[in-house]
Every structure is written in C-alpha cells, then in structure tokens.
Amino acid sequence: MTRAALATRGPYRKGVERRELLIRTAIEVFAEQGYRSSSLREIASRAEITPAGLLHHFSGKEELLLAVLERREERLAAAIELHRPRSVAEHAAVVIADGEQSACLTRVIAVVSSEASAAGHPLHELFRERRARELERITAGVVVDQARGLIDPHLDPEAAAAVVLSAMDGLHVQRCYGVGAGASQAFEDLRRHYLEPPQFAERAAAV
C-alpha cells in the first residue's frame, strides 16, 4: 500500500464510522420523537459530535432521514435475497418478519409515515410517492399470483394489494405497541382466509 493510501485510509474509515454512528443515533431519536419534534442538535449531542460535525456528513434532517430509509431498504433487500420469496404473500411475510427483528427501525417507519400523512408535512409527497410505488408493485404481483392460482381470482387486484399493504403497516404499528398476536402469525391467518383461492381452504378443511 502506498503512503498516500495509508494517509487517507484512517480519516476515510473514521468518516464512514461517524456517518454510521449518526444514522444509528438518528434511528433512535426519530423512533422516540418522530421527525418534526426531533432536532439535529439532539442527534449530534447523543452521537457526541458537534452540530457542525453532523452537517459535514448530512446537509440536514431530511437527508439524515433519507439515509435511515435507505438503511431500511438495505435490510429488506438482504432479507429478500436470503429468503427469495416467490409470491406476494411470501414477500410480505419476509417484510413483516424482518420488521419484528428490527423493532427500532420499524418504529421509525411507523412513526414518521404516520406524521407524513398530513398534507402540510414536509415529507408528505415523498411518502405518498413511496406508498404509490409499493401499491403498484403489490398490485402487479397479485395479478401474477392470481394467474398462477396462488391468490383468489375473484379478488380485485388493487383492493387485495391495498389489504396486503395495510396489513403490513398495521401489524408494524401493533408491534410498536407490543399488543396482540405475533405479526407473522396474524399475516399467515390473513393469507389463508383472504388471499388463498377457495379450493385451498376446502382442501385444508378436508385434511
């Protein structure tokens, strides 16, 4: 390794580690206080860095939240790569199970997305677009799964997709309160009693 590489390796690694610390701290603060009530000063204080030092890595609170959302997407991508879901229901089950394993990050998504539902919220349009894309993706998956015989063909694809997405959101919120049955089991019941074609239920009842 050259002297130049050695000279830059330390500062670069330190910068990466500090950025990672700020993201982890932001997850904690956003989960506790939401987006609007939290402050960069609080995040910087908990991370034991100056506000100016934080702004060296992130231009503001919105960019920091985007980094948190990206962290969530990275976790989901890794879980999906590991489990390789083959249907809408399996994909949703992976997302829900991962949410149970990353409670703090899941709480951030639940808290901030609830805040952002208000039309005047600075992140309203961002979350609206994310939700629209997700609903479109699930709807397309429902159509494919209906053709494969995995989802009741009598269900309206958009309505079924809305139910799946709402269930995922609602079970994440329920997880934050720590009440009710396990999220994964609850979604499995929804899959069997709502999504599956009638003949699947008839076979199960006959066994």
Image: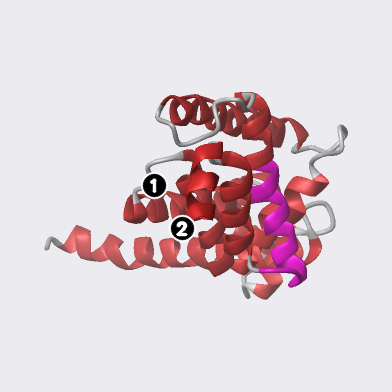
Residue occupying the point 64% across, 49% down: 168
Residue wearing tag 1: 85
**Magenta stretch encompasses residue 43:** no
Judge by depth and name the residue closer to the eye, 202 or 36. Answer: 202
Eyeballing the image, is 78 above or below 41? Answer: above
In the foreground, 137 or 203? 203
Name the secondary structure under disc 1. Answer: loop
Identify the residue shown where x is 69% and y is 61%.
107
Q: Nearer the viewer, residue 11 or 162?
A: 162
Q: Would residue 108 be visible to someone looking at this image?
A: yes
In this view, which residue lies farthest toward the front?
206
Residue at image coords 58%, 26%? 136
Q: Amino acid at mark 2?
A: Val
Disc 2 is placed on an element classified as loop
Quadrant location, the N terminus: bottom left
Q: Amino acid at mark 1?
A: Pro
Which residues fall within the magenta stretch? 165-181
Residue 164's image quarter? top right
Is residue 8 shown left or right of residue 180? left
Query: Do we see residue 58 in this rendering?
Result: no
* Label annotation for residue 15: none
63, above or below 21, in the image: above
Q: Magenta residues: mostly which secondary structure?
A: helix
Picture coordinates of residue 158 (x, y %)?
64, 25
To which residue does mark 2 refer? 207
